[in-house]
Amino acid sequence: MTQSIDFELTGKKIFVCGHKGMVGSAIMRRLANENCTIVTAERSELDLQDDRAVKEWLGAARPDAVILAAAKVGGINANDTMPVRFLLDNLRIQNAVIDGAFEQGVSKLLFLGSSCIYPVHAEQPMAEESLLTGALEATNQWYAIAKITGIKLCQALRKQFGVNFISAMPTNLYGPHDNYHPTESHVVAALIRRFHQAKLENHDDLLIWGSGKPLREFLYVDDLADGLVHLLRHYNDEQPINIGTGQEVSIKQLAEMLKDVSGWQGNLVFDVTRPDGAPRKVMRNDRIHALGWQHKTELRNGLEKAFAWFVENQRVARL
């Protein structure tokens, strides 16, 4: 079914905010296939936490649309041990970019939230309507609160001024240009690094945080970028919209799959003294499916591509 066009990309100038991160770089790859102009700003020229600088930069660049993919992100340990950075840094970035885009008359803004905005015991799969219906997962509540604030700011600007600012909620992501830091990375990137190291150094065992029982949903980042471009073109509504696969796998199954992909032959050891996080997190994707979008990359194939990228790009990987 042909979907109506809300925002035509042809001839438009699109500011990708956070263009060197995993999500931003994937958006750059996807937009390269569109007849639009991509604009970016290096950290050395623009501090995204400086609201005045952001407003002036947007006024000079005059983008037609902004995709806000810049954020302070990290895995369960980073979220739990650096709450101030995850709350305050993200609030500053969001407020500066969203308010600056409004003040400078940007036609459309797409804000990226996260599946962690939903209550820890939300009904599964998680629908957009479950937002703010219960308590958040304790270890990442700081990041979640920042993201919820960004969603609400976009909604407030829509309500009061009628602007076309939308929010998308990606599920757990993985792929090229992820953060592979040993204590601050998300689970897929952390395991990719550790399996690669275990194989190179002939380790007998590989330790994994938690019981391995939690269920998670994973989306290849280039599929996310395709979904975001689809939303930029077709979506105009105040309600945040989920982007995921709807397919779940346990952390143990994920680890076993990556073990097979890596070719390492040792033993998996699960450290049950470490936190598991939410017991289950999978999202309902009915609304984005109704707009004509579906993910394309199945998990095994995506993990193979992500692992190969890491092995071949050690010089540019964020270690």
Image: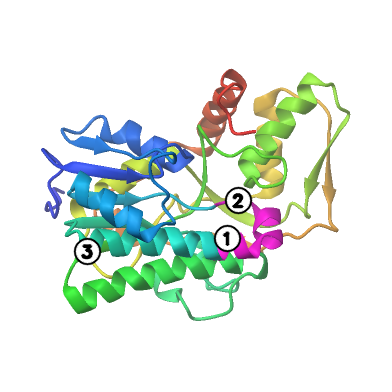
Which residue is at the front of the view, 99 or 242? 99
Determine the residue positioned at 59% across, 60% down.
85
For the point 43% across and 52% down, the residue is: 244
- The quarter of the displayed image where residue 289 is located: bottom left
What predominant SS class does the magenta segment belong to? helix
What's under tag 3, amino acid-wise? Glu
Query: Looking at the image, is mark 2 or mark 3 earlier in the sequence?
Result: 2
Neighbor class of circle 1 (other Cα within 10 Å; few <14, some 14-19, many 20+) is: many
Which is more toward the observer, 153 or 235? 153
Residue type at mark 1: give it.
Phe
Which residue is the site of mark 1?
Answer: 86
Answer with left or right where residue 249 lies relative to residue 104. Answer: right
**Which tag, 1 or 3, sits closer to the chain's start?**
1
Whether 84 is among the magenta residues is yes
Magenta span covers which residues?
73-87
User: Which dot marks residue 103?
Assistant: 3
Farthest bottom residue?
A: 133
The answer to whether mark 2 and mark 3 are in CB contact below 8 A is no
Residue placed at 27% from the left, 44% from the top? 15
Looking at the image, do the residues carrying marks 2 and 1 touch, with CB atoms under 8 Å apart?
A: yes
Which is more N-terminal, label 1 or label 2?
2
